[in-house]
Amino acid sequence: MKITDRIGGDRPVFSVEFMPPKDDAGEAELWKAIRRLEPLDPAFASVTYGAGGSSRDRTVRTTGRIASETTLVAMAHLTAVSHSVAELRHVIAEYAAAGIRNILAVRGDPPGDPLGEWVAHPEGLTYADELVTLTRSLGDFCVGVAAFPYGHPRSPDEDSDLQRLIAKVRAGADFAITQLFLEPEGFLRLRDRLSAAGCEVPMLPGIMPLTTLRTLHRGPELSGAPLPPGLAERLERYADDPVAFRAAGMDLTVALCERLLAEGVGGLHFYTFNRSTATSELVHRLGLQARRGASVA
Ligand code: FAD
């Protein structure tokens, strides 16, 4: 099933993002999370694509298992990092053979330093819109792309960043998922600007549950989204009390999600970090779990 058949209905949905496990213990933890979240009926479950070798094989394998062994709609991420076009074709063919119809086409970052110099593979691709075009040319895939409410860290300004997002949609992207952010304004502004440009694809906000002091600081570091001073102040007072921090952080995450739902977003995409507890709690508090008797894809 395609993701676009599961989002944009009359009730908001949620989706979940996992990372390929690093070892057997990680694999067990991931599958525990998948099995706990499955009955809540996420619209889809995605698996990120790593920087190289065995991690990439694990993405293909894990996404294939989700597609074949669970009731979930699976989406595989794919990046252009260190791949020739021939290799990208091969990975896309592997996804297709595993029954995966949904691909998140992102460029990826240089291995090691995400803000280091980007060097394309000599026979590869440079930007995500090219990966969208390639994926689309190889089959009947539903393709998602990345969006950045505060602009991609490499973009000179928000306007050129918007034009790049529009280019990805024009290349054939069906929907977008945003980088995580901690206050709604940037997302809502980007959504308005996209719509004003005549680009009406669904854009799902990426949500990171604020459960620890580390997530509070890592989030902005990874995403380029600002850490709102008021929010930092409210949470940092609990720096020495992890239980109180988590409670306050989850309240703030719920408030962010409620505002986005009130603004009419069609779904929320949760970065799970391969855990189920925080995501499950948010889904229940927001009333996004499967309705009794509703069909499961
Ligand atoms: P692009 O759209 O190609 O943009 C990259 C930069 O180039 C931007 O600054 C853009 O403005 C600029 N640009 C684009 N086109 C042009 C052009 N024609 N001329 C000049 N400049 C241009 N990374 C992973 O490694 N694995 C993952 O699984 C993964 N999943 C992600 C999921 C989500 C939801 C998000 C938001 C990000 C994900 N990332 C992942 C991170 C992503 O790969 C990086 O943020 C990367 O730096 C940008 O990817 P992109 O697809 O937006 O690139």
Image (tube, rainbow, N blue to C red):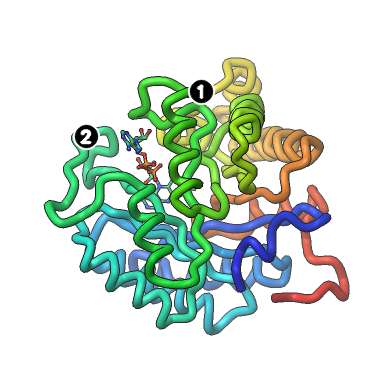
In x, y percent, where is residue 279? 65, 53
Q: Position of residue 36 (x, y in %)?
A: 65, 69
Residue kind at label 1, given as amino acid type:
Pro
List the residue tagged with mark 2: 116
Kindly state the secondary structure of the residue where label 1 is placed.
Answer: loop
Q: Which residue is mark 1?
A: 226
For residue 157, side relative to residue 31 (left or right): left
Quadrant location, the N terminus: bottom right
Choose between 147 and 36: the one closer to the eye: 147
Between 224 and 174, the residue placed more toward the observer is: 174
Which one is nearer the viewer's eye here, 213 or 293?
Answer: 293
The quadrant of the rendered image in which ligand 1 is seen is top left
- What amino acid type is highlighted by mark number 2? Gly
Residue 80 figure quarter: bottom left
Residue plotted at (65% across, 66% down): 37
Seen in the picture, residue 140 relative to 200 is either above or below; the reply is: below
Q: Quadrant of the C terminus?
A: bottom right
